[in-house]
Amino acid sequence: MIKVGIVGGTGYTGVELLRLLANHPQAKVEVITSRSEEGVSVADMYPNLRGHHDLRFTVPDVETLSGCDVVFFATPHGVAMNMAAELVGKGVRVIDLGADFRIKDLELWSQWYAMEHTQPEMAELAVYGLPEVNREQIKDAQLIACPGCYPTATQLAFLPLLENTLIDHRRLIADCKSGVSGAGRGAKVGMLLCEASESMMAYGVHGHRHLPEIKQGLALAAERPVHLTFVPHLTPMIRGIHSTCYGVLKDPVDHDLQAMFEERYADEPFVDVMPAGSHPQTRSVKGANMCRISVHRPQGDDTVVVLSVIDNLVKGAAGQAVQNMNIMFGFEETAGLNIVGLMP
Ligand SMILES: NC(=O)C1=CN([C@@H]2O[C@H](COP(=O)(O)OP(=O)(O)OC[C@H]3O[C@@H](n4cnc5c(N)ncnc54)[C@H](OP(=O)(O)O)[C@@H]3O)[C@@H](O)[C@H]2O)C=CC1
Ligand SMILES: CC(=O)N[C@@H](CCC(=O)OP(=O)(O)O)C(=O)O
């Protein structure tokens, strides 16, 4: 049984880690931190965890956390950056759910995150934790940068098309919708029920911090820089990302896109390529570590449309983080993650 620490245990991804790890056969949460809830019992704050975790929040402290085998950071960007080096130096493996180590070009990172990156060596060491691309490097990684939620859904949609150089890398569009929990537990007034329900809006049209992350991943798949228009939207649901991705075929002959997607993800436990003509629903992945994808070529035209859905808190955050932990420690990749989505 490995010992797990979680920094940022009161937030949405922190509590989701607790939910998933409650059923993990080889991992036990030993340390959970919160600066604002020090001393409070986890089960008192989150009654869904009663009977599953006998833990109290403590303040984050490297000394205490260094008794763990692995530490998850479920914290805003800038937090993991300041503690990861010390922990890794003490032999603790670190999985950051935030964005501190996702982008390799640190000048670009600083532009988008409006702060200086203080740990270039750690950024260099970090492995981008998208198992469908980096499984081999994840096995030996000391530090994992878990992908963002929009980047997970969008990269998984575009990868087969770009890896096979089927679409024009200069004309990619990702039209994405997120549930409100994507903004975290400390969300501002725009996320209140009265503000966010019965309405939908785009945001970040001129630039969202996930744009450089998605472009970095797609450029590696295409083996050249890509041009992407990425427009996120806020939708009145609690969980879920729906990413509608458009690519233009270079050569509009008859391609068996369905077979290509099925083959690309045949061995992936957490990507489900749906039958031709399907329209995946976000609720089919609610609570599950799953990305459901369908590929379309409307009217036989030269535009390919890929629909990709995930739960932002699971395959988009905590589930993917546990999947990474499983790969790092040589556990079954599906351990603790065999969860069927909630319907309705
Ligand atoms: N919500 C989502 O769908 C997704 C989120 N992520 C990323 O995961 C991370 C966590 O997100 P989420 O759970 O939504 O965030 P929340 O705002 O819900 O929670 C943040 C947590 O971090 C703790 N925290 C805040 N500041 C610090 C600090 N300086 N030092 C230590 N702990 C701190 C908070 O507790 P306290 O203040 O009491 O210490 C709280 O427990 C973020 O980087 C987010 O961008 C990634 C993918 C999806
Ligand atoms: C709805 C909403 O506000 N979503 C968040 C992104 C989700 C997220 O948590 O960002 P990371 O994956 O980078 O951590 C946003 O647009 O900023």
Image: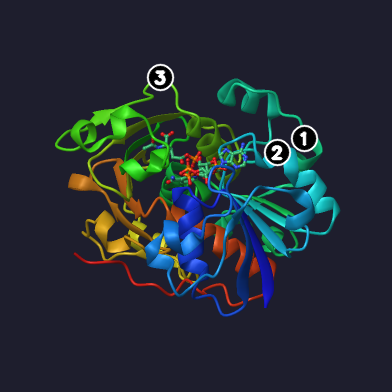
The label nearer to you, 2 versus 3, is 2
Whichever of callouts 2 and 3 sits on the residue coming sooner in the sequence is 2
Labels 1 and 2 touching (C-beta < 8 A): yes
Q: Alpha-carbon neighbours of circle 1 within 10 Å: few (<14), some, or many (≥20)?
A: some
Q: Which mark is residue 206?
A: 3
Q: Residue at x 61, y 72 (%)?
A: 28
Instruction: Please report the residue visible at 52 percent of the width from the left and 50 percent of the height from the top.
Output: 163
Q: Nearer the viewer, residue 80 or 127?
A: 80
The quadrant of the image that shows the C terminus is bottom left
Read off the residue under disc 1. Answer: 119
Residue 286: image location, x then y, percent: 32, 60
Rendered image: mark on residue 81? 2
| Sooner in the amino-acid sequence: mark 1 or mark 3 | 1
Q: Is residue 122 left or right of residue 265?
A: right
Q: Which residue shows up at 36% across the image and 62% down it?
A: 287
Q: Amino acid at mark 1?
A: Gln
Looking at this view, name the residue that lies furthest to the right: 89
Of pointers 1 and 2, the one earlier in the residue sequence: 2
Residues tagged 2 and 3 counted as in contact (Cβ below 8 A): no
Amino acid residing under circle 2 = Met
